[in-house]
Amino acid sequence: MLRASSHHLQPILFTTPAPLFALLPTLTNLTNVSFALLEKSQSLLHPKSANIMPINCCRCYSLGSNFKRVQHVVGQPLTPKATASFITGTSSEGGREILVQHLLVKENDMKLLLELQKRVAEGEDLSDLAVEYSICPSKEEGGMLGWVRKGQMVPEFEEAAFNAPLNKVVGCKTKFGWHLLQVLSEREESILEYIQPTELYEKMQHPSFLEEAQLIDVREPEEVAQASLPGFAVLPLRQFSSWGPEIMTKFDPQKDTYVLCHHGMRSLQVAKWLQTQGFKRVFNVTGGIHEYAVKVDPSIPTY
């Protein structure tokens, strides 16, 4: 269904200034634990990607769907804080993730394509052009597709993106039209895993575990007062706006991070978001503290 055509634009590369925009999350409406379901740029997603359903029913859970473009200082590392199209799931290949922005024009609109190529070559920012001319819904975020890895995009787009040098604008064609795309940054792939309460219990019996791991409980204070586990830092999901922007200063993205809630749903939302922040290994506690109480420690109250 999402197969792309085999045509490619000739490998035209344009050197542009360092990217000016990164993403900054503005997470809202957090009192509703179902959250908004993103539909941005889903036409580029490959139907055989891990954990991805056919496009008409594909939904990517996210903590928020509102993003702001912020100034990037030339010469400084680009460290984006969020993504609009990140799909959770581990890749069988492993490897790297890339941060991609693009614009899309109709297949028969060659005049516009050539004009945009010229403007990019003259130094205009691709994200600004995307806002004005792209026909992809991602234009609302300056053409930002977020962090992606192999197997998530249609083959022609993926091939062009994963072979593009950083900050070079590359052209390719898919069944959706002509794309001008730019890879802004790359990083080692983040991993999300699920851990059973019994496994967590076994790990917590080792004194070194509490020193080496990071434990986060995203339930509300009144819930924690009823039932809790030792060593977990309480970061209530409804208070995300207060602790979210400081997550990188309070926690180490290189350490294994375990996320807990009541039944494992809110924690999954936060675990996925932590992935977008570059946390290397994130564990969601399956079934939450309720299942921990049922299967591991009956002395913990259930509610």
Image: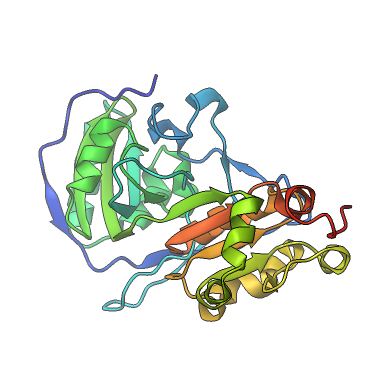
- Quadrant of residue 189 within the rendered picture: bottom left
Residue in the image at 31% along x and 55% along y: 126
Q: Is residue 281 left or right of residue 298?
A: left
Q: Nearer the viewer, residue 65 or 134?
A: 65
Residue in the image at 67% along x and 59% along y: 260
Work out whether 30 lies above or below 75.
above
Work out whether 194 lies above or below 28.
above
Q: Is residue 165 left or right of residue 290?
A: left
Residue found at the far top of this picture = 1
Q: Is residue 257 left or right of residue 91?
A: right
Q: Nearer the viewer, residue 210 or 225?
A: 210
Colour scheme employed for the rendering of this structure? rainbow
Residue in the image at 39% along x and 19% along y: 1
Is any atom of residue 30 visible in this view? Answer: yes
All told, the count of numbered labels is 0
- Across and down, in percent, residue 93 comes to 29, 43
- Across and down, in percent, residue 12 comes to 11, 46
Residue in the image at 78% along x and 66% along y: 228
Q: Nearer the viewer, residue 116 or 68?
A: 68
- Across and down, in percent, residue 28 comes to 69, 58
- Quadrant of residue 179 within the rendered picture: top left
Is any atom of residue 115 visible in this view? Answer: no
Q: Is residue 134 left or right of residue 115?
A: right
- Across and down, in percent, residue 108 comes to 26, 26
